[in-house]
Amino acid sequence: MTMSSISSLNNSQYIGDDEQLAEKRQRRQLVGLLTPGAVWLFAFLLLPMFVLLAMSFNSYIDAQIINEFTLENYRRIFTEPVYGKVVLRSFTIAITVTAVTLLLGYPVAHFIARKTSKYKDLLFLALIIPFWTSIVIRTYAWKILLGNSGMVNYLLREAGLIDLPVQFLFSTSAVVVGLVHVFLPFMIMPLYASLDKLDPSLEEAASDLGANRIRTFLRVTLPLTLPGVAMGSLLVFILALGSFLTPDLLGGTNTLMISNVIQAEFLESGNWPFGGAMAVSFLCLSLVFIFSYNRLFRFDQ
Amino acid sequence: MLQPDVELTGITKHFGSVVAVDNVSFAIPRGDFFSLLGPSGCGKTTIMRMISGFEQPTRGTIEIAGQNMSGKKPYERPTNLVFQHLSLFPHMSVAQNIAFGLEMKRTSRTETDRQVARMLELVHLADYGQRKISQLSGGQKQRVAIARALVNAPAVLLLDEPLGALDLKLREQMQLELKRIQREVGTTFIYVTHDQKEAITMSDKIAVVNHGRIEQMDSAVEIYENPKTAFVANFIGETNLLEGNLSLVNGSAATVSLPGVDIRAALNFKAAKGTGVSLSVRPESLVMGQGATSATNRLNTRIEDIVYLGSMAHYRLVSQEGLRFTAEVTQKAMAELPVRGETVLIGWEPEDGRLFETRQAAA
């Protein structure tokens, strides 16, 4: 047998080797690219979370953290009604904020998506500009606007609509207003992405087939942009549920949200085990919620 | 003529300072297959969008089935449109797509089901009602789009180059299919296309549109045989256009001076000596080789290229005077002809050429 015939016989084998080599190289590249991020996440997210988890099983006796296994912290969370109330309030606020941002954001996203490109950029810029200012400053601005001697009350009084200033601040509504303002762009972005992908001729087709604007929206535009609605809602919901600053500044004692309570346990009471247990419980609750939501809307498809 | 189904009177459309449609008027009798034919950007799609209500004319009126359409929204008009990219609703089944228009009219469930079944039958998709749109082939989507529009029993069905995305075989098949459907339902069809073959195959009447104006409106045969303008002659089928002046006029017989050569041609309009004209000669009217020796107009040309088109071939020719011609020859006749690079005699009779005035004679 000559050399050439041997090589031709083994050709398929060589190709297989090449493919394996390429695959190996690709895997090496992938590992190289993922490692820095993975290390970061491990050191600053996973590790602290495990510390938190371990901490949550410690005892807290006489203002002392004692390394002694207990489930007392979790028992307190699930039996003392005040914590259930905080969780319920947090979910209510988060759902309200999600609903309001969706209602306010959808028309804006639709408007931007249907604009010609020249104005599109400008409108996008307007959407992003608020991010250049710290959320703390923006939230304080709401204090100035809504305070008893603030601008809204001043205008209402000047217009003769009220005699005494209206108590806007330190209420659930004030927290909702503040959160809607902060999270609105997070709703508009995914909505815009899905509306922009939607072929306008589908809306024209509906109109041509006898659907007025409302029915075109309900039967064509909305169903086809549901992925954007689901995505934006999830994003805003999660952000709102974990919000800490806005309820702290605009809310009162009876508008405390989960994060405020956890923060108080850690920084004010010094009860780290109980704070840890709350953080862990809250994380699990959120994960269950997100997981069911994901199953419901099937993001993976 | 019967009461026209669609009547446009003096329709003009401006987009900013651009005049997209310029004073267009036509009337289409009920049940006609009418084509708006023209190059892209000629305004044909704008005309169609004004008829369906997506654009409002700057001036002029549109009447459909005797009703003035001005100010009426698309969903208030007795028209339906088959979109260029079909625009089927991807989140609905085939049957739901077709039922959409009926649903909007709040038709009863049983009646809707009956109508949808009838439409699926008409477009030969009887068993496809439950399919998803993404499961259909290009030709099947096409049929669903037509069914979705026709189920509403529109006075006029508008079609915006709906066959553009299909391959040639399927396109030809769908052309015949469309014609069959149109005969069966008897609805007025307005077909927008840039494909002259498509327009000629299907239409009762064709309006050739150029720069927002109608150049000629006639039957397919008339447009091909008797084009009224040089643009129409050039756009419908291939033609040889030669620019020259009338050097002799004697009733209907004229002599045209082209650069370096005089040609005899039949004159079918009144013109004086010195008038600038375009002479159009169809490639199939040119005789080559032996047969050309007895022709009235004769030229010696060199064969620059031969393009095979299956049963035919196009010869690209250039005369000694620098005039360029394309001649169409059947495969059979090719054996007798010289090869590329050699010279060949071409000829044609005066009545095979058509003259179009390009500029009046200087007084």
Image (cartoon, rainbow, N blue to C red):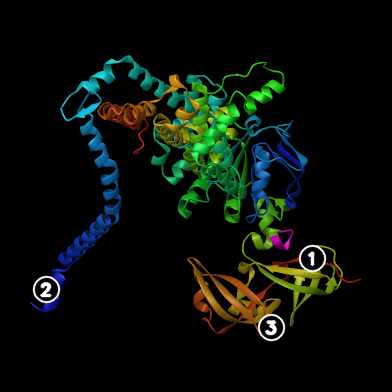
* Percent coordinates x, y for residue B323 in the rendering: 67, 78
Q: Quadrant of the N terminus of chain B?
A: top right
Task: Tell me the tag on residue B357.
Answer: 1
Can the viewer see residue B83? no
| 3D distance between C-alphas at marks 2 and 3 | 67 Å
Which is the main secondary structure of the residues drawn in magenta? loop
Please name the amino acid that badge 3 sits on. Glu
The picture places residue B132, in percent across and down from the top left corner, at 40, 36
Residue B230 magenta-drawn?
Answer: yes
Disc 1 element: strand
Amino acid type at image mark 2: Ile
Q: Name the mark on residue A6.
A: 2
Seen at 66% across and 37% down, the residue is B53
Report the front residue among A265 and A35.
Answer: A265
- Residue at mark 3: B321
The subunit letter for the residue under badge 2 reads: A
Q: Are dots 3 and 1 in contact, CB under 8 Å?
A: no
Say whether residue B198 is left or right of residue A267: right
Q: Earlier in the sequence, mark 3 or mark 1?
A: 3
